[in-house]
Amino acid sequence: MVAREAKSSPGLTQLLDAAREAGVPVEDVPRSRIDALGVEDHQEVAAIVRPAPDLDERALSQAAFDPDALAVLLDGVTDPQNLGAAARAAEAAGAAMLITRTRRAAPVSPAAIRASAGALLHLPHARVANLPRAIERLKERGFLVIGLDERAPRSIHEAPPPPRPLLLVVGSEGAGMSRLVREACDELVSIPMAGKVGSLNAAAALAVALFGFALRPS
């Protein structure tokens, strides 16, 4: 939907052209109709989308992962902004799947989708009740499982580039990974912190680990 009051700009023109090329219908509506959606800072444009349904634990056994697959597991990330930012980093890194908990974890809400810049509309997302069991399913499929842990003996700079397929595990900012998830990992690595801040939030830590470790050339 585009507000009739919207002023033409190069960015808006490109957006409308891309929508028409993709076969997405565009409707001119009063700005009040977009305002009624409750979206802040909508810049007089809104899209109605239907997120793909969440996958379940069976998808971990049935998905067609290629031998070079990269997957991401979030343990206890409850903030939708953090979930969205993590999904954005994972999708940008070419991850094949995002895995989160069904309980005590952020759902795929409008706030999370917005924070993901749309990544949650593209990235397959499995929500599972038992993360250690999900990890074991991926291990059975040949995944190496590496978790981020500030107490790990080796940093991402000291560890060699990890082989694939790879599951990268990140815990919450406060509690980190749960004990059972930590024990299910094949290896733990840390992110070296050189400043006065002692930690990064989950999404920032994931981005560092993805682009500074998981995607590092061997």
Image (spheres, rainbow, N blue to C red):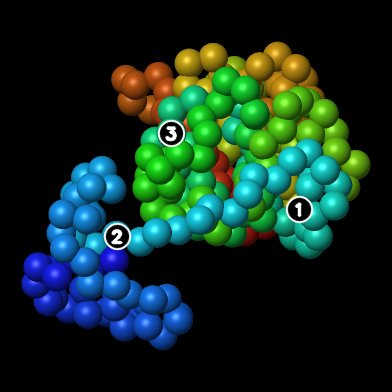
Q: Residue 175: x, y in percent?
A: 54, 14
Q: Residue at x 59, y 54 (%)?
A: 52
Q: Which numbered disc flags the more N-terminal residue, 2 or 1?
A: 2
Circle 2: element type: loop
Q: Is residue 164 above or below residue 104?
A: below
Disc 3 marks which amino acid?
Pro
Disc 2 marks which amino acid?
Ala
Please give the residue where the numbered disc 1 appears in the rendered image. 164
Please give the residue where the numbered disc 2 appears in the rendered image. 46
Q: How many residues crowd around disc 3 within 10 Å: few (fewer than 14), some, or many (20 or more)? A: many
Q: Nearer the viewer, mark 2 or mark 3?
A: 2
Q: Residue 109: x, y in percent?
A: 45, 39
* Nearer to us in this view, 26 or 153: 26
* Nearer to us in this view, 136 or 31: 31
Circle 1: element type: loop
Mark 3–mark 1 contact, CB under 8 Å? no
Q: Which numbered disc flags the more N-terminal residue, 3 or 1?
A: 3
Q: CA distance from mark 3 to mark 1?
A: 29 Å
Circle 3: element type: helix
Mark 2–mark 3 contact, CB under 8 Å? no
Q: Residue at x 81, y 60 (%)?
A: 64
Q: Which mark is residue 172?
A: none
Disc 1 marks which amino acid?
Arg
Q: Which numbered disc flags the more N-terminal residue, 2 or 3?
A: 2
Residue 138: quadrant of the picture: top right
Residue 126: quadrant of the picture: top right
Q: Residue 92: x, y in percent?
A: 50, 57
Q: How many residues crowd around disc 1 within 10 Å: few (fewer than 14), some, or many (20 or more)? A: some
Q: Which mark is residue 80?
A: 3
Image quarter (top left, top right, bottom left or bottom right) of the N terminus: bottom left
Q: How many residues crowd around disc 2 within 10 Å: few (fewer than 14), some, or many (20 or more)? A: some
Query: Does residue 205 appear in the picture of this structure?
Result: no
